[in-house]
Structure formats: C-alpha cells, structure tokens
Amino acid sequence: MALGNGYDESGPVSVAWTTELEDRPARARPILIGDTIVVHGRDGTVTGIDLRNGTIEWTLDGHETSQSYVPVAASAVEGLAYAWAGDHVTAIDPADGGVAWRSETVDGVDPDLASVPLRADGDLLYAGADRPTAFDAGSGDLLWRHDSFETFGVPYFTPTFEGDHLYVPTDEGIVVLERATGDERILATDPTTDEEIVAYPPELHNLTRPVVTDEYVIVLAHGEGMYAYDRLSTRPQWEVADSYYWGHVLRDGIVYASTYRTVKGLSIEDGFEAVAYDTGDRAPNGVPVLDGSSIYVGTGGSDGGAIFSFDAASRDTNWRVTTPSDVRTAPIVAGDRVVAATEGEIFALTEE
C-alpha cells in the first residue's frame, strides 16, 4: 500500500500503512475492537478499518446517524461500539458496521451537546449529554437519568467507574452517583455548617475524567490546573496551577498529564513533579497512553504533527514519527502496532 507523503520515522519504528479519510477527517480518538479500528468523521460517517493492513471494511453513512456521531469502544460489552446520534444512542457491530440497536429518543437531549463520548462498564452504558444518563448496553433500554446536574458537551469529559459508583464531571464539580440507580451519594458533612456535601470540588469547572484511588480523587480543570481531594472527607490535599489539558492517567503513584510541549508526571501524594517528557515544539493532544514501559502521545504543531514514544523510566525518546498534519487524539497501542489519526488520514506504525 502506498504510504502518505510527509511521514518521517526517527528510531526503531516504521510506517506500516496509511489510509486516507477523504472528506471524513477523524473527530475523536479511533477505537479498536478485535482487529477492527472504528473511526468517526466530522461528517457523521463511521468507518471500519482492518488493523492489519489498513483496508476499509465498511462505512456507515452520516445521513443514517448524525453529524455529532462519536463512537467510543465498549469491547467488554458484547464487542459493540456505541454512539450518540442526535437524541438517541446507537450500537454498532464492528464486524460489518450494522446497527445492533438504537435506543428510544431521550427527551430533552440537546444535539449540540451530543459530542460527549459514551462509556460502557459491565451492562451499564453511560451517556453524558446534557444530563447524566444510563442505558442497558445489551438492549439500549433507558435505565435512569439524573436531572440535578448538567454535564459537558466536550469529548474528554467522561466519568470514572469505581465499584458501585460513577464519578461524573458536572457543572457543579465531581458528583458521585449510584451505578444502579443514578441517585446522588452524600460524600461528607461540612463540620462547620452540617450541610451535606454531594460534589467535589464545587468551586472548579471544566473538569476532565477524574482519577479515583482509595485515598484521593484527583481532577484536572482543563487549561487551569490539577487538584487532589481526600476521597472520604472531600478536603483539598494539594493543587498544581498549570495549563494541563485533555485529562490524566495514573500509574504506580504517578499522575501523567499533558501541558504545552511537555508530558508531566506528578506524585499522587503531594503533586511534586516526578518526571517530564519533552515533545519539543509540538503540543501534546489527548491523554498520554501508558503501555508496558513506554508512554505514547500524539502532538500537533505549526509544521505538522508527530507521535512520540518515551521510555517511562529513563525519559529518553524511544522513537518519533512526524506526520503531515496534527495528530489530534491519543494513539491506540495494540501489540507492536500504534494507530493514530491526523486531519486527513489514519495510520499504523510498527515498533521494531
């Protein structure tokens, strides 16, 4: 297969294939279910691509869905991809692009906010449009809808599943809901006023998906900073004011997040900067991806984009591939393959 122009490998990696997205540039991070990569385009078209060779296997035209169609992987739930399609939810079979089911219309859903990805866990399919909403992942039946808090219409604001609870970014902070019913969980009681606390932190907005541990709830306010709260009392523990973006991920006591031209790792105990990975003159896009001993990140810049692989321990650059346009989302790592999308193509790299 002919490779696209403008790719330049540096290090032990090669471009395995590239596939043009034509007039369907990727809008959200591609997802992988089995050997099929599912890519959604800004025109509403969803495309299934073979991981092995980049061949387009099927397309689901945008007129059958919506311009706000955003698939998100749910491989643990019958191998389906799920998406908002205007005012309802659609489940897609990645084998052939067929519609497995489509939910009933959800009253009051604003299609302008329907770009929030869905997140499945077990049999629960969470959908954060204008209100936290849950569906049965196998049938599409509406399970519950929470009307007290509004969520965000931005693709990286997704909830965290933790046991029997959902930690949901809302316009009032991180709200904890009962997984089965959607009821609010009372987190703590204010010792000075005896008022019930149902969200943390109430003073912050534009929150990305929280990191939840036994001791902490760590949240990132998009473009503002990172904040840690005691999980039981909701009291502030530490904060780092910096222009963090996209979200964060935890490993071995280190919280990783992207800033301008850098991926940083902060200690979960005190917010101290433990490690940093330099992306040069290119700004990271998407949440850093940790796989094995490596950290992967897609970037954009004035002269195109790049994919970086860093050694997590030494901070050295394992390899870098520059691309003809910005890599707008986090990559996918599948064995020795790293898959990502630019404005006009989806491509796969092979680590050597």
Image (tube, rainbow, N blue to C red):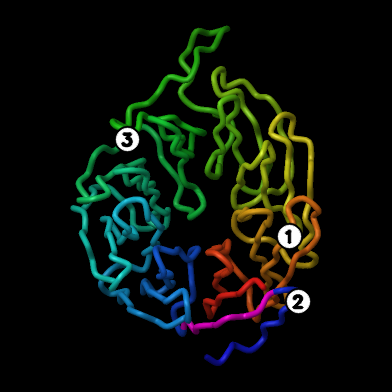
How far apart marks 1 and 3 lie (CA) works out to 41 Å
For badge 3, the amino acid type reads His
Q: Position of residue 70 (x, y in %)?
A: 40, 62
Q: Position of residue 99 (x, y in %)?
A: 23, 66
Q: Is residue 289 magenta?
A: no
Q: Quarter of the image for the C terminus: give it.
A: bottom right
Magenta stretch: give its range.
13-21
Residue under label 3:
146
For badge 2, the amino acid type reads Ser
In the displayed structure, does residue 142 sit left or right of residue 299? left
Residue under label 2:
10
Residue under label 1:
310
Circle 3 crowding by C-alpha within 10 Å: few under 14, some 14–19, many from 20 = some
For badge 1, the amino acid type reads Phe
1 vs 3, front mark = 1
Q: Position of residue 60 (x, y in %)?
A: 30, 75
Q: Residue at x 48, y 55 (%)?
A: 155
Q: Quadrant of residue 325?
A: bottom right
Which callout, 1 or 3, points at the residue further toward the start of the chain? 3
